Amino acid sequence: GRRLDVLDYRDGAFDRAYIEFNVRLSDLDTSLQFFINRAFEKAYSVREALSLLRRFRQLLRRDHLLRDLDEKQVLVFHQFGLQILQAQRIYEEDKDDPPLPRDLPPVAGHIAWARHLLRRVQEPMELFRQQAPDV
């Protein structure tokens, strides 16, 4: 509420208010960073983590928070690589006798199984492409 005279160098009120503002801003940044970290810890899939990245990038404007999102994107990409390896392992283990739904004939069941594995890889890949079209 109080009006401050920025040009009055003898009055330290502006300096104190500016320092207090920066302390509160730093506290806010810390709280926001904690919130972002918790959100990524709770993300149960690559798709959800990519969605969080997209949403936070739209909201954040502070450089150090954006740099942290860049680091998180690298971690999500690594997690996606592990997901690809898992899909490959499942394919190699089950390709000769995949688990089939009861209501499908064998050929259709094999196709549905293979498409499911492909979707597990393609959907996050498409989300990565949308977030970084020049990569």
Image (cartoon, rainbow, N blue to C red):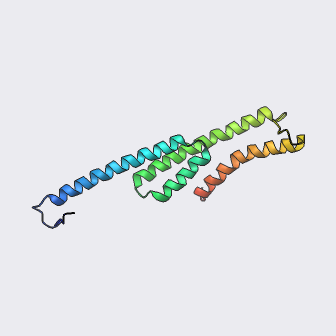
Q: Residue at x 81, y 45 (%)?
A: 112
Q: Hey, which quadrant is residue 2 in on the image?
A: bottom left
The furthest residue to the top:
93
Task: Decide which of 73, 107 is in the foreground and name it.
Answer: 107
Residue 111, image x, y percentages = 84, 45
Q: Which residue is drawn at 54% across and 45% down?
A: 74
| Res 40 seen here | yes
Q: How many numbered markers are drawn?
A: 0
Residue 8, image x, y percentages = 12, 66
Instruction: Tell me the quadrant of the picture where the N terminus can be found.
Output: bottom left
Residue 59, image x, y percentages = 46, 58
Task: Decide which of 131, 4 is in the foreground and name it.
Answer: 4
Q: In this view, does 120 lie to the left or right of 133?
A: right
Q: In this view, does 13 lie to the left or right of 93?
A: left
| Res 132 seen here | no
Q: In this view, does 78 lie to the left or right of 9?
A: right
Q: Which residue is drawn at 66% across and 54% down?
A: 126
Q: Which residue is drawn at 27% across and 50% down?
A: 23
Instruction: Tell me the quadrant of the picture where the C terminus can be found.
Output: bottom right
The furthest residue to the left:
10
